[in-house]
Image (cartoon, helix red, strand yellow):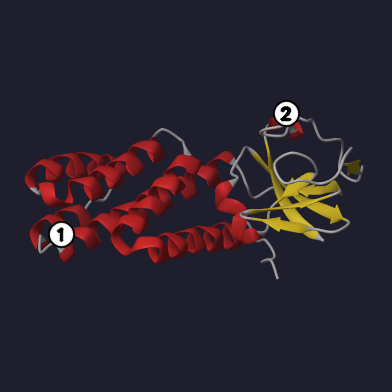
Amino acid sequence: MVAYKFLRSERAGPFSRFRWPEPGIWVYADKDVEACRAGIHACRTEDLPWWLAEELWEIELRGPVRVDGHKIVAPAGCLRSRIEHWTADCAQEYAQACAWRARNSAVQSLRRASHAEAAGTLARCGTLDELVAAARRLADDVPDTRISLTIAGDGAVRALSGAPPTTAYIAAHAALRVDGPAGYAAERAWQSRWLTERLRLQASA
């Protein structure tokens, strides 16, 4: 099975700190596979937003592949090739897209609370700096939607500081606040599609 794996720079595991060998060299689990404890962990395209790191690799898995939440695990794996489209610039582009999605959730929250003028002000923001300033100002003017506005402002701040994983997390929770679990799931699905299409990946079957 071909899947994907995010790693730190120079092929280092984000949690295990294991430094992966060159592509094509197989790595085997030294004990029975158990999610988060033993085995070769990877992800499908729909899992990508949960595991962002500096490098993204295509990985081949061998043996029974188990699905565990937003990850998959197998007894063996080898790196195939690095996804060159995943760069620092691409990660920043993704963060900014997520920040604007959080803004859109706040706009929806304002409109549902009958704050049309405030919603228009937020919708007209043309830069993330403008979004931060507007969200903070409006949070004082329309306190019944303060949490959604604060979330939108935080998303913009995180995007400006270069934190794509946090920005994506914030966008998902902005959608959760507006539309509940279905909104959260839809936002994570949008993030997965953005990454899959932008990185020219083959969507998981």
Which residue is at the front of the view, 26 or 100?
Answer: 26
Is disc 1 surrounded by few (<14), some (14 to 19) or many (20+) residues within 10 Å?
A: few
In the image, 166: left or right of 176? right
Residue visible at 55% across and 59% down? 192
Which residue is at 15% across, 43% downward?
139
Look at mark 1 in the image and give the residue it sits on. 120
Q: Secondary structure at mark 1?
A: helix
Q: Which mark is residue 110?
A: none
Residue 58 appears left or right of 26 = left
Q: Could you tell me which secondary element the residue under label 2 belongs to?
A: loop
Residue density around tag 2, few if under 14, some if 14–19, many if 20 or more, within 10 Å: few
Camera-side residue of 118 and 33: 33
The amino acid marked with disc number 1 is Gly
Q: Which residue is mark 2?
A: 17
Tell me the mark number nearer the camera, choosing from 2 and 1. Answer: 2
Above or below, comparing residue 145 to residue 178 in the picture: above
Q: Is residue 168 left or right of residue 133?
A: right
Report x, y in % for residue 90: 55, 47
Residue drawn 85% across the image and 48% down it: 77
Asked which quadrant contains residue 106, the reply is bottom left
